[in-house]
Image (spheres, rainbow, N blue to C red):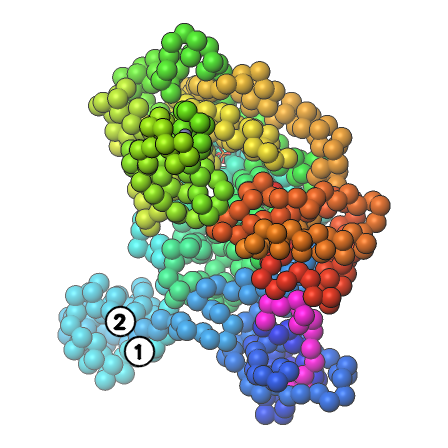
């Protein structure tokens, strides 16, 4: 883009509220050619030197004594105009510095000005015109091999040419000296999946529902561009719908972004996409090297990559030619970022699609209440797939009352029904999935005499036993101690373990089915790179009989041989002190249950609980989303929770409780005076997790039906408080707009 003016708008690369606005600078003549929108520049700022991002041009600067840009730090603009606009939108919407949004858009290997990682360049060989007329020339057989190879593989890396033809380097050199080939040094794209071979089958015919879904979405792309909710039961074949839509985009010359909750837990989707779309796809993965990440980013920006698959941050892939964003498992919590900028991928994706005229498709078997509500209201287009592929039935769910089991003398963690079915399935060589939303061995340790529960001294939450029962660990900060023999409070020796974690389930399976091949998938067993893939492909290939796991195994997995799913305790997620506890429990149970009976053999689920009459569990057991939704939406309406109102959470944290409480009270008063009677303020009060990593936490939650008004009131209140010196500087404030996690 040519420089239209000599003044530019710059955002300073410092994530501080006080400088979160646009500053004007002059561009000296010597830099005019290089300063573009999206360039990273060096400039004086206050008394120091700083770096910033050019976000626009202005005809007239707002200040008289304007300073000059000193240098351009990025060889090419780092940000596309669309992404700069998106970052500004995020800054307003999520009340974060615009530069924080810009920073999180860059891949790790590309941090603003200090581009540590360079592209990988290799020598590539090409045939010259003379070389194409080879038969007339006299060359040796090895040289001929090279020429033949290059006729098919024009521009291949030299190392590849030599290894594929078996020719020595000297042959290549003599071809060079005869002017038959040429070699040039070029950047190549490091495709981390390039070497693996993925093979999957392509369904020849779509089901009627799939066909209708694809058609509805194409229609929406052409005419309305409303966001689409693809509400399809587990195993209805949503992936195939995504693929067809993407193929259409490729045909139209458009790029697509596919968002998944967690890429490491999506080996199957990656495999399907890689095998079907080949080198047109880039998979963004936290396991990528910095160089690989940088390469992918550059090739996306150049439009060479047509499909980007990745987690949250892939929503910022620098696609100049975006046609489509797909968000799989729309309801997943991991789409919300927990640290600054605290954005929800769904909202950012929706806004980006609106800005770039692209289609936004959300897919789920258990949509979030908010999204489904929008679809029912007509703000989104609702596309439904009610049947599984080949009309396979949804699995039957047995609810087992664990109180009854206990009364009848069964002290095992497995009900008799589950035990019987496990034995039977194993004998029939069918696979079993056991789900428990808690890792470790036991969930807590307590004293039988005085009731003392061993807690983390840094986090105020109970410790979980691991490694058989030898150690206690904190799941928040990693603190760990050996299990004490006597109670630290009363000195009694009656220390006992309670509750169940995945480690213990695994051990019980070994006892019940000594011959079975068992695997466990949780945060403890999958921390090593590639560990999850091994487990996944192990189950897929039938090398594992029983898979025990946490919510990791609840999502999207397609194992046709799994005919039994056991939910060891459905109660864990149900009773959290959270407005969304019921919603999460419903989603989790429906999703886990949905792993059974996806192949030719029908599936069954055994759901164990201490509250069998809970309406959420009952809807989930029938996989009755409609029934669940009607019940939940009524509760939300009565209490003014989303989608009927929205919330902002203001979380304060500090090291001393008294100082914190006092500061919070003062700041809350400043905020209170700026809000209206239409805003309901809850707190300030201690957060449910009162202390994490030695920091005490207090929060206030503002409920509102006018986010814009509340945001500006809150911003004014905080600004006033800061001006008067509150809160003290080691107290941190985290603002979360539309929070998902209120713990
Ligand atoms: N038209 C088709 N004909 C035959 N098989 C198909 C067809 N479409 C999809 N399948 C197969 O059906 C299975 C389920 O599809 P998929 O995994 O996409 O379901 P899903 O809707 O994403 O389910 P979930 O929400 O549980 O992840 C896969 O094994 C897939 O290969
Ligand atoms: Zn801790
Ligand atoms: Zn005690």
Give the labeled residue for mark 2: 158
Residue found at the far right of this picture: 677
Give the labeled residue for mark 1: 183
Where is the C terminus found, in terms of image quarters?
A: top right
Residue 219 in picture, x, y percent from top left: 66, 44
For the residue pair 628 and 650, the one nearer the viewer reads as 650
How far is disc 1 from disc 2 in space, using C-alphas?
A: 8 Å
Q: Is mark 1 within 8 Å of ligand 1?
A: no
Q: Is residue 545 visible?
A: no
Question: On the rendered structure, is 536 left or right of 22?
Answer: left
User: Magenta segment, which residues?
Assistant: 14-27
Question: On the rendered structure, is 52 left or right of 262?
Answer: right
For the residue pair 70 and 222, the one nearer the viewer reads as 70
| Callout 1: SS | strand
Q: Residue at x 39, y 47 (%)?
A: 479
Q: Residue at x 48, y 40 (%)?
A: 461
Residue found at the far top of this picture: 408
Where is the N terminus found, in terms of image quarters?
A: bottom right
Residue 674 in picture, x, y percent from top left: 81, 55
For marks 1 and 2, the one nearer the N-term is: 2
| Callout 2: SS | helix
CB under 8 Å between callouts 1 and 2? yes
For the residue pair 724 and 356, the one nearer the viewer reads as 724
Neighbour tally class for label 1: few under 14, some 14-19, many 20 plus, Cα within 10 Å? some
Neighbour tally class for label 2: few under 14, some 14-19, many 20 plus, Cα within 10 Å? some
């Amino acid at each position: 883009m040519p420089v239209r003016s000599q003044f530019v708008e710059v955002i300073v690369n410092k994530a501080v509220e006080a400088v979160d606005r646009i500053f004007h600078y002059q561009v000296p003549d010597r830099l005019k050619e290089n300063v573009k929108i999206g360039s990273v520049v060096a400039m004086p700022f206050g008394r120091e030197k700083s770096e910033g991002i050019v976000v626009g041009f202005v005809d007239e600067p707002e200040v008289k004594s304007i300073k000059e840009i000193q240098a351009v730090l990025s060889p090419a603009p780092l940000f596309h105009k669309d992404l700069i606009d998106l970052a500004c939108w995020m800054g307003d919407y999520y009340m974060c510095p615009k530069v924080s949004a810009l920073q999180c858009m860059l891949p790790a290997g590309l941090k603003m000005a200090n581009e540590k990682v360079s592209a990988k360049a290799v020598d590539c060989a090409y045939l010259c015109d003379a070389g194409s007329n080879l038969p007339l020339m006299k060359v040796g057989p090895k040289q001929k091999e090279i020429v033949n190879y290059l006729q098919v593989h024009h521009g291949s890396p030299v190392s590849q040419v030599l290894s594929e033809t078996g020719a020595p380097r000297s042959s290549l050199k003599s071809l060079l000296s005869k002017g038959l080939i040429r070699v040039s040094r070029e950047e190549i794209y490091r495709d981390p999946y390039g070497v693996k071979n993925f093979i999957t089958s392509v369904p020849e015919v779509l089901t009627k529902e799939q066909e209708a879904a694809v058609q509805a979405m194409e229609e929406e792309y052409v005419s309305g561009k409303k966001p689409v909710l693809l509400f399809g039961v587990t195993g209805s074949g949503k992936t195939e719908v995504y693929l067809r839509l993407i193929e259409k985009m490729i045909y139209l010359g458009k790029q697509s972004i596919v968002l998944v909750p967690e890429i490491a837990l999506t080996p199957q989707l990656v495999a399907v996409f890689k095998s079907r779309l080949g080198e047109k796809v880039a998979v963004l993965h936290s396991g990528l090297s910095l160089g690989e990440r940088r390469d992918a980013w550059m090739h996306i920006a150049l439009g060479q990559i047509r499909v980007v698959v990745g987690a949250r941050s892939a929503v910022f892939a620098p696609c100049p030619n975006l046609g489509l964003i797909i968000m799989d498992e729309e309801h997943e919590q991991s789409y919300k970022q927990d640290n600054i900028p605290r954005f929800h991928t769904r909202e950012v994706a929706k806004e980006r699609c609106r800005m770039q005229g692209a289609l936004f498709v959300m897919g789920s078997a258990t949509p979030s209440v908010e999204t489904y509500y929008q679809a029912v209201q007509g703000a989104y287009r609702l596309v439904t797939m009610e049947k599984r592929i080949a009309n396979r039935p949804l699995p039957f769910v047995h609810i087992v009352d664990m109180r009854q089991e206990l009364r009848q003398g069964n002290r095992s963690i497995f009900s008799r029904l589950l035990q019987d079915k496990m034995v039977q399935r194993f004998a029939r060589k069918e696979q079993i999935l056991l789900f428990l939303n808690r890792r470790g061995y036991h969930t807590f340790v307590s004293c039988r005499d005085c009731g003392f529960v061993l807690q983390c001294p840094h986090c105020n939450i109970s410790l979980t036993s691991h490694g058989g029962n030898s150690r206690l660990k904190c799941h928040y900060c990693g603190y760990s101690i050996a299990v004490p023999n006597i109670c630290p409070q009363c000195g009694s020796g009656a220390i006992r373990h309670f509750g169940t974690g995945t480690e213990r389930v695994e051990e019980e399976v070994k006892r019940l089915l000594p011959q079975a091949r068992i695997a466990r998938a949780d945060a403890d067993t999958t921390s090593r790179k590639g560990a999850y893939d091994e487990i996944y492909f192990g189950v897929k290939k039938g090398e594992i009989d029983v898979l025990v796991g946490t919510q990791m195994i609840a999502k999207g997995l397609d194992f046709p041989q799994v005919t039994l799913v056991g939910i060891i305790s459905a109660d864990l997620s149900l009773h959290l002190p959270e407005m969304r506890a019921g919603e999460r429990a419903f989603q989790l149970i429906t999703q886990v249950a949905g792993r059974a009976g996806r192949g030719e053999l029908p599936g069954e689920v055994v759901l164990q609980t201490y509250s069998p009459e809970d309406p959420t569990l009952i809807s989930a057991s029938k996989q009755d989303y409609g029934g669940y939704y009607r019940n939940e939406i009524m509760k939300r309406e009565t209490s003014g929770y989303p989608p009927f109102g929205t919330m902002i959470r203001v979380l304060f944290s500090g090291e001393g409780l008294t100082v914190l409480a006092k500061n919070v009270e003062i700041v809350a008063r400043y905020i209170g005076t700026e809000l209206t009677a239409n805003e309901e303020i809850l707190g300030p009060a201690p957060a449910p997790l009162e202390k994490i990593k030695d920091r005490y936490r207090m929060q206030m939650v503002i409920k509102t039906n006018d986010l814009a008004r509340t945001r500006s009131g809150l911003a004014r209140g905080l600004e006033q408080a800061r001006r008067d010196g509150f809160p003290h500087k080691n107290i941190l404030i985290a603002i979360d707009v539309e929070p998902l996690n209120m713990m």
